[in-house]
Amino acid sequence: MSDEWAAHELFDEDYLHFYSPMLTDEVSDAQAARIWNLLGVAEGACVLDLACGHGRIANRLAQRGAVVTGLDATALFLDAAKRDALNRQVTVEYVEGDMRAIPWVDRFDAVVSWFTAFGYFDDDQNRDMLTGIRRALRPGGRFLVELNHKDGMLPVWLPSSIQRIGGDVLIDERVFDSLTGRVNTNRMIVRNGEVRHLSFFVRMFSFTELRDWLLQAGFRTVTGFAGDGTALTATSRRMILVAEK
């Protein structure tokens, strides 16, 4: 697996085609409001949306009055984000770059990693990312990360899934590796008469595991929530962690 797989294989136009229909304006508005409330940011706060994708969260945070920067490795996504920002009449600084090499120090009041944007590299690189995130925050700044919750996911684990949009099909076959904590996925996409195969993995965490990583990276405190912002329980399928520098 090359270092550039995430930008050029998984996160592309096919990804937008299959995932955008479920990320409606109503869903995205609610998620942006949840992020705003959990971070406790105020108008004028400097916020980094890390792996910002096509800007659905970054642009909404800008609408609420934040000064937003979006970092992503996929130019296609950034182009879509800029078009959406123009339509919403907001200003966001969009930067093409690798989230493993965050270029800022002591710049942001908050950093956001939303919709399982963390965990796509080996453990050393994932840990280094947390250090880079902490370095990019101002003293007292907060990092919010949202992703799958291992404790809630494994009891209801599905080894495969199918998404259909018209005649287009996306099929995932998944295996959870207990030795690495990774979900290894083989994906097949059938679209416009063509078939494409790709493989990728993403690290899955329990709250305590990722909390400890964050503390080891130098964050002072870490709190946890379910994906909807309520109390985290053993059956929560998604979780949010908020870490303070």
Image: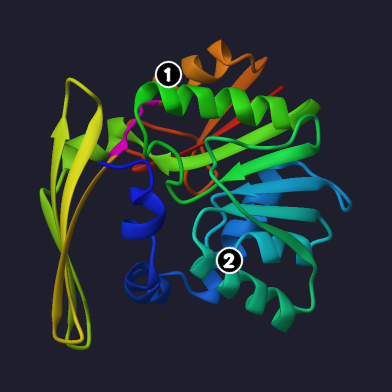
Above or below, comparing residue 151 to residue 200 in the picture: above
Q: Quadrant of residue 12?
A: bottom left
**237 part of magenta stretch:** no
Q: Residues within 10 Å of mark 1 (few under 14, many from 20)?
A: few
| Residue 227, percent from left and from top | 47, 45
- What's the CA distance linking mark 1 and mark 2? 33 Å
Q: Nearer the viewer, mark 1 or mark 2?
A: 2
Q: Nearer the viewer, residue 101 or 112?
A: 101
Q: Which mark is residue 208?
A: 1
Q: Nearer the viewer, residue 178 or 53?
A: 53
Q: Give the left or right position of residue 230, taking residue 81 as reference.
A: left
| Residue 101, percent from left and from top | 58, 35
Which residue occupies 45% across, 39% down?
118
Q: Quadrant of residue 169?
A: bottom left
Which residue occupies 69% across, 46% down?
48
Instruction: Please say if the residues under marks 1 and 2 sit with CB atoms less than 8 Å apart.
Output: no
Q: Residues within 10 Å of mark 2 (few under 14, many from 20)?
A: many
| Residue 154, percent from left and from top | 20, 36
Which residue occupies 58% across, 49% down?
97
Which residue occupies 25% across, 26% down?
181
| Residue 186, percent from left and from top | 14, 52
**Residue 31 in view:** yes
The earlier-in-sequence mark between 1 and 2 is: 2
**Residue 54 in view:** no
Where is the C terminus found, in terms of image quarters?
Answer: top right
Circle 2 is placed at which residue position?
Answer: 78
Q: Amino acid at mark 2?
A: Leu
Q: Amino acid at mark 1?
A: Thr
- Element assignment for label 2: helix
Above or below, comparing residue 209 to residue 66 in the picture: above
Question: What's the magenta region?
Answer: 202-206
